[in-house]
Image (cartoon, grey):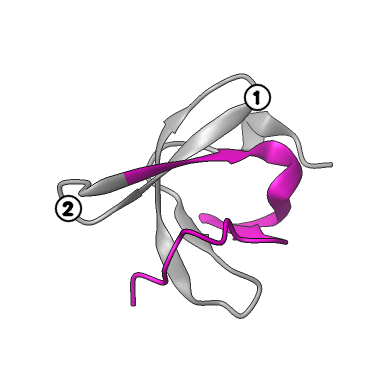
């Protein structure tokens, strides 16, 4: 499991194929909010157990929420 302290607002969120899903818009104790659009049109709650890895300023999800379409 990743360290939730590694995730910060503004980081890019991608699926396992590298497609951009959005950005981290808010960080909580058990989850973070993934925002799409600017300003955010939609927000999705993502639990930390879905994070596969954090690489630089990018968060990669092991299993992207099925309701989240790619932003690209």
Image quarter where the N terminus lies is top right
Query: What percent of the width, then of the height, locates residue 65?
Result: 57, 56
Q: Residue at x 75, y 34 (%)?
A: 3
Q: Is residue 17 left or right of 36 when viewed as pictured?
A: right
Circle 2 sits in a helix, a strand or a loop, which is it? loop
The answer to which quarter of the image holds residue 48 is top right
Query: What percent of the width, then of the height, locates residue 64?
Result: 61, 60
Let me know if residue 50 is in the magenta part: yes
Image quarter where the C terminus lies is bottom left
Magenta residues (range) = 43-72
Instruction: Find disc 2 in the rendering and name its residue.
Output: 38
Number of residues whose C-alpha sits closer than 10 Å to that of mark 1, classed few (under 14), some (14–19) or many (20 or more): few
Q: Residue at x 69, y 61 (%)?
A: 63
Where is 14 relative to 49, above or below? Answer: below
Taking the view exactly as shown, the residue that stands out farthest to the front is 67
The answer to which quarter of the image holds residue 20 is bottom left
Where is 62 relative to 72, above or below? Answer: above
Which of 21 and 6 lies nearest the eye of the viewer? 21
Number of residues whose C-alpha sits closer than 10 Å to that of mark 2, classed few (under 14), some (14–19) or many (20 or more): few
Instruction: Find disc 1 in the rendering and name its residue.
Output: 30
């Amino acid at each position: 499991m990743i360290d939730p302290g590694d995730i910060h607002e503004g980081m890019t969120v991608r699926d396992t194929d590298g497609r951009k899903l959005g950005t981290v818009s808010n960080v909580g104790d058990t989850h973070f909010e993934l925002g799409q659009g600017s300003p955010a049109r939609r927000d999705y709650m993502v639990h930390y157990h879905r994070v596969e890895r954090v690489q630089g300023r990018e968060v990669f999800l092991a299993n992207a929420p099925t309701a989240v379409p790619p932003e690209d």
